[in-house]
Image (tube, helix red, strand yellow):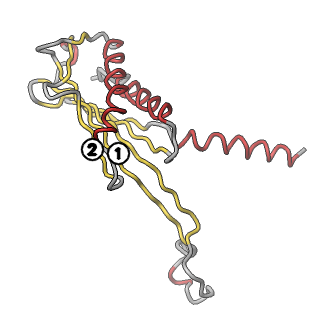
Amino acid sequence: MRIRSIALAAALLALLVPEALARVKVTINFDKAFDFKSVKTWGWGPDGPGSIMMARTAEDDLDAMKKAAEPPIVDAVTVEMTRRGLVQAPSGPDVIVTYYLLLTTSMSAQTVGQFADATNAWALPLFPQATQSLKILNRGSLVLDLSAKGAVVWRGVAQAELKMDTPVKKREELIREGVRDLLRRYPPKQ
């Protein structure tokens, strides 16, 4: 019975850990002097909704990534701004929304003896440095800027780590979740 309980707990943990890696971490900053109550309309900037910056591999295709990532970002921002009671204005909006999607790859490794105290070196047998743990993940940050009169008055950053083989549908869900979590904090409580 005890072995079955341990096996069940291990199976649940194995299912939950990948989901935990995909959680979105959100932070916001805003201009405390700006009157957010006066904002009624929003719009995209004259140069387009935003831009994507990638620093992963030499084969990264920026145009393909923009075609894949921009529609869910634009759609999610439009839905969430409407939920906040703001109206999209074709010209002369109170705030201009701009997104930046930053994509990188992160890696962490641990080697045998990495955490051994330097003063204990005389007591440990010699052993070759070998990698015990290697983790390579895609890391993405979505930055949303709301600007008024040429100055950023609100900035939200949503960050997540993804496994390399995360399906496109899950990536889109994370984008929507990140935008929703960011704009849930707009307008800021002053």
Q: Is residue 123 left or right of residue 140?
A: right
Q: Is residue 135 left or right of residue 72?
A: right
Specify few, some or many for label 1: CA neighbours under 10 Å numbering under 14, 14-19, or 20 or more. some
- Percent across and percent down for residue 46 are 13, 25
Vertical placement of residue 184 versus 134, above or below: above
- As rendered, which of 100 and 150 lies closer to the eye? 100
Mark 2 sits on what residue? 53
- Percent across and percent down for residue 110 are 53, 67
Mark 1 sits on what residue? 103
Which residue corresponds to the image point at 34% horizontal and 23% vertical from the top-left?
183
Q: Quadrant of residue 177?
A: top left
Q: Quadrant of residue 11?
A: top right
Amino acid at dot 1: Leu
Amino acid at dot 2: Met
The C terminus lies in quadrant:
top left
- As rendered, which of 162 and 16 lies closer to the eye? 162
Which residue corresponds to the image point at 90% horizontal and 44% vertical from the top-left?
1
Q: Is residue 49 left or right of residue 118?
A: left
- As rendered, which of 106 and 115 lies closer to the eye? 106
